[in-house]
Amino acid sequence: MTRRPDKVGVLISCLLFYAVLFSPFMTFRANRIVAGETKTMFESLPTWVAATFLIFTLFAGVIAFFRSPIVLRLAVSLIGLVAVAIVAGLAATTLTPDNNSYARVSPASGFWLLLTAFLLLATDAVARLQPKPLLRVVMLGGALAVLASVLASGLSDDLSILKEYANRADIFWSEAIRHVELALGSLFAATLIGIPIGILCAKVDRLRPAVLNGLNIVQTIPSIALFGILIAPLGWVAANVPGASAMGIRGIGMAPAFVALFLYSLLPVVSNTVVGLAGVSQAVQEAARGLGMTTLQRLFRIEFPLAFPVILTGIRIVLVQNIGLATIAALIGGGGFGVFVFQGIGQTAMDLVLLGTIPTVLLGLTTAIVLDALIDSNLFSASRKREA
């Protein structure tokens, strides 16, 4: 270890030191509605647990501050993340009175600062290690497995967010399925329709500006406004087209949410298809013509495989975007994790808001990492060699 400070580590160290020395760690409330009372780490935990965690956090701050070995930084960050989760659960158990189902214990600013600091330290270490795509996916799977183990152990059951989950477990999973259906279903439809439109735009120059400008206009409409615009036409279809209502097409509910997400998804898919096909070198196309390939053969055997990594990047953008936008669908009865977000806002229950927000963030982060690894993998090596 050298004595020269690490630029990113300075920020992480400041977050860690401020979190454990000056910030409240937990908030105790007599019930889910009343204002809470903040507690420090030593007020929330047994003294020996708080002291041990404090020493470890200060040590992690020193490791982050200096240019220490990357593997050590990664190990400290991972241990820190697990320790934060376990300590938060112990604090909730310590602060919750026996046989009291009304009391709520929530993480305070110190917890979130610690979580942010250790996540930054882990992200910085992974970025510097530059792991191969498969290793990234394995690391993600390991992190999710550890998180699932901590939750399954019951150590965190007294945290207010998990009490909210316990009260809504059945609804939670049904809304989770609805959220995934909206995100993936709209992506599938946009891919099915957007890729042919993109191919057409790439081949017909006069068509390209009109299509891309039209999709750009759709992209600028706020999501809530677009949901509202779709209520009237879909309501008319449900009332006047035989069988439409039986198929689930209505002015409110999943149908307008699905259509809105589909419309938002078209621009990234179409534009990336155009860019991908335009990026195929002229020399490759001339060689294919010299081999006697027809236009369709060149498209499906040469151009499209070479353009697919760029198209997949557009699909990644759409999927992460749709996972976030699907939260708004709850405003028009579309379901998804947004149900908990807007219920929590209406009831001034922040833990209920987090019950919808945290799974949405985890789902988006997971899909982004997996698709990034797929794009960076050797899956398209054969196409690259063919182009060369």
Image (tube, rainbow, N blue to C red):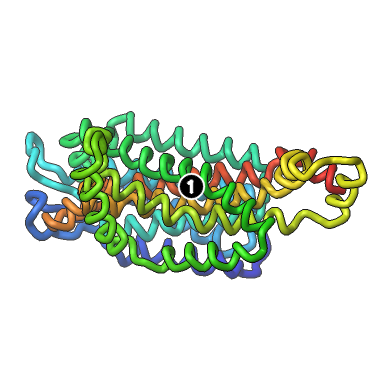
Expressed as whole percent of the image width and height from the top left, the position of residue 290 reads 92, 46
Expressed as whole percent of the image width and height from the top left, the position of residue 387 reads 84, 47
> Is 72 left or right of 167, judged from the image as shown?
right
User: In terms of image quadrants, where is residue 166?
Assistant: top left
Q: Is residue 152 visible?
A: yes
Neighbour class for label 1 at 10 Å: few (<14), some, many (≥20)?
many
User: In terms of image quadrants, where is residue 100?
Assistant: top left
> Is 134 left or right of 334, judged from the image as shown?
right
> Is 39 left or right of 374, judged from the image as shown?
left
Q: Which residue is found at the position 68% from the left and 54% from the top?
A: 276
Expressed as whole percent of the image width and height from the top left, the position of residue 281 reads 82, 56
Q: Is residue 234 above or below residue 148?
A: below
Q: Quadrant of the N terminus?
A: bottom right
Q: Which residue is found at the position 63% from the left and 53% from the top?
A: 200
Q: Which residue is mark 1?
A: 190
> Is 272 left or right of 381, judged from the image as shown?
left
Q: Which residue is found at the position 58% from the left and 35% from the top?
A: 138
User: In terms of image quadrants, where is residue 328?
Assistant: bottom left
Expressed as whole percent of the image width and height from the top left, the position of residue 120 reads 50, 58
**Is label 1 in a helix, a strand or a loop?**
helix
Q: Amino acid at mark 1?
A: Ala
38 and 259: which is toward the camera: 259
64 and 213: which is toward the camera: 213
